[in-house]
Image (cartoon, rainbow, N blue to C red):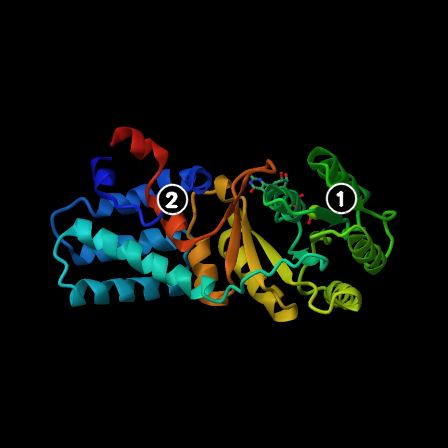
Amino acid sequence: MIFSKLFRRQAEPDPQIEAGLKKARRGIFQDIVALFEGTEITEDLYEDLEALLIQADLGVETTVELLENLRERIRNEDIRQPADAREALRTEMIALLHNATKNRKIKVYQRGVPFVTLVVGVNGTGKTTTIAKLARHHQKQGRCVMVVAGDTFRAAAIDQLSVWGERLDVPVIAHQPGSDPGAVVFDGMQAAHNRNIDILLVDTAGRLHTKHNLMEELKKIRRVMQRHVEAAPQEVLLVIDATTGQNGLSQARHFSEAVEITDIAIAKLDGTAKGGIAFAIARELGTPISYIGTGEKFDDLAEFTPETYVDGLFFGDEDEQEA
Ligand SMILES: Nc1nc2c(ncn2[C@@H]2O[C@H](COP(=O)(O)OP(=O)(O)OP(=O)(O)O)[C@@H](O)[C@H]2O)c(=O)[nH]1
Ligand SMILES: [Mg+2]
């Protein structure tokens, strides 16, 4: 890839993100880069680009909008060289992601007031693993973390969280399988207060937005939290599985209608060649994407920024070695 040498990174490289996006970079995005290796910006180029972006999971509407913006920029800046057009594409991709991140609230961590993160999402998206990763992330910042096993649905879920807790040396508040999630959350809030915890991470059972009772349960959990800390949960994190593509997006849309989501984590980005889901989420939901999951280990979490993400789709350490 000779062309890769002409890329300009938009941000400091994030090795985690670049490693996580390897499949996407070596898959569809490599084909996208190849489109710009010609000598002219042709109508065929736009058409092929459209097909590839849709394939990369941006979805039709987001792709159409991105291409309109790209054409406009190319016109306004009188861009003639395909390599410059490719850079214009990257600029527009970053702008699209900023649509969502500009809504991100600054997180305020106060001593003596637990910062509560409620983690929600459909079955199997990566919620419990993301909790472990977040615990690790906060520990590295010197914060004191506690976890609540709010998924009381399955015994295995409680065990899974306990194993992570042991590995990370983080206390886990858990009740018996089948018990009321509100009750374990109540205990968790109390314990967080008593033990001066900075961060309380609350796991929940996977659920579909169509299950009315389960969605009501989330509202109840929220009320229980607010009895202890008025501002809680300060973060409601929706975990989306990147490998489910547009399907994941539609689940997220419905989920956001039912509960107030403050942030999104996209998990399993390492498992798919389709990094485009982030753009569809940014455009359609406008909810800030805050984290991405790039593997199954507790260190496999990266903070999301539009610049590092787009860099990661086009640029990796394999290019660094070539350059
Ligand atoms: N490759 C990869 N696998 C992941 C990632 N996050 C989670 N997983 C795997 O996905 C599977 C499901 O993860 P969980 O964390 O149990 O998902 P969950 O949302 O808690 O599932 P339920 O509680 O059953 O709804 C596990 O095998 C995880 O190891 C990731 O970022 N990358
Ligand atoms: Mg789970």
Instruction: State how far apart marks 2 and 1 are (Cα).
Output: 33 Å
Tell me, for residue 312, which label it has, or none. Answer: 2
Q: Position of residue 120 (x, y in %)?
A: 66, 57
Q: Give the residue pinned by disc 1.
A: 157
**253 or 305: nearer the viewer:** 305
Q: Residue at x 42, y 52 (%)?
A: 276
Dot 1 falls on a residue whose secondary structure is helix
Q: Residue at x 80, y 54 (%)?
A: 188
Circle 2: residue type: Gly
Q: Position of residue 207 (x, y in %)?
A: 70, 57
> In the image, is 203 to the left or to the right of 61?
right
> In the image, is 43 to the left or to the right of 209?
left
> In the image, is 218 to the left or to the right of 245?
right
Residues at marks 2 and 1 touching, judged by CB atoms closer than 8 Å: no
Q: Residues within 10 Å of mark 2 (few under 14, many from 20)?
A: many
Q: Position of residue 135 (x, y in %)?
A: 65, 45
Q: Residue furthest front?
A: 111
Dot 2 falls on a residue whose secondary structure is helix
Q: Residue at x 78, y 67 (%)?
A: 220
Classify residue 158 by image quadrant: top right
Query: Is 131 above or below relative to 183?
Result: above
Circle 1: residue type: Ala
Q: Residues within 10 Å of mark 1 (few under 14, many from 20)?
A: some
Query: Is 250 above or below relative to 241?
Result: below
Confirm if mark 1 falls within 8 A of ligand 2. yes
